[in-house]
């Protein structure tokens, strides 16, 4: 009776690697990009709007958003440090 549409297996298309852009903690612009340099084992986080940058250690199991989170932490520490001085 009730005909079911046969479930087709959805093939995952290889996603184009879009640059992940995050919000800047300093200027608020969504212009923060995470560039991973595996050969240097460094990760560069940079806001294209205000030029805020951070350099982090590359970790194999990290996702760009993890670096971004670290970047936020670093920035907050800097702000806290400058305010507390
Ligand atoms: Zn910014």
Image (cartoon, rainbow, N blue to C red):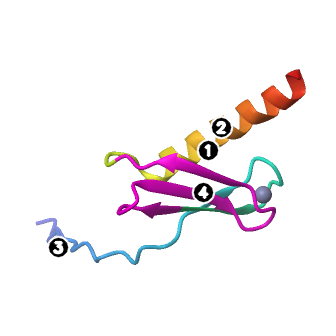
Residue with the mark numbered 3? 8
Residue at 36% x, 75% y is: 15
Residue with the mark numbered 1? 71
Q: What kind of element bears circle 1?
A: helix
Q: Which mark is residue 74?
A: 2
| Quadrant placement of the C terminus | top right
Is the shortest distance between ligand 1 and the CB of mark 3 under 8 Å? Answer: no
Q: In the drawing, does residue 72 fall left or right of residue 9?
A: right
Q: Position of residue 5 (x, y in %)?
A: 18, 72
Magenta stretch, residue numbers? 35-59
Instruction: Give me the C-alpha separation between circle 3 and circle 2.
Output: 46 Å
Q: Residue furthest front?
A: 40
Q: Are marks 1 and 4 in contact (CB under 8 Å)?
A: yes
Q: Position of residue 35 (x, y in %)?
A: 51, 64
Residue with the mark numbered 4? 45
Residue at 54% x, 64% y is: 20
């Amino acid at each position: 009776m009730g005909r079911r549409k046969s479930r087709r297996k959805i093939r995952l298309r290889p996603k184009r690697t879009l640059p992940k852009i995050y919000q800047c903690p300093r200027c608020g612009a969504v212009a923060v990009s995470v560039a991973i340099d595996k050969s240097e084992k460094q990760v560069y986080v940079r806001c294209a709007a205000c030029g805020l940058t951070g350099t982090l250690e590359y970790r194999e199991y990290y996702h760009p958003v993890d670096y971004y989170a670290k970047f936020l932490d670093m920035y907050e520490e800097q702000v806290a440090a400058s305010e507390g001085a």
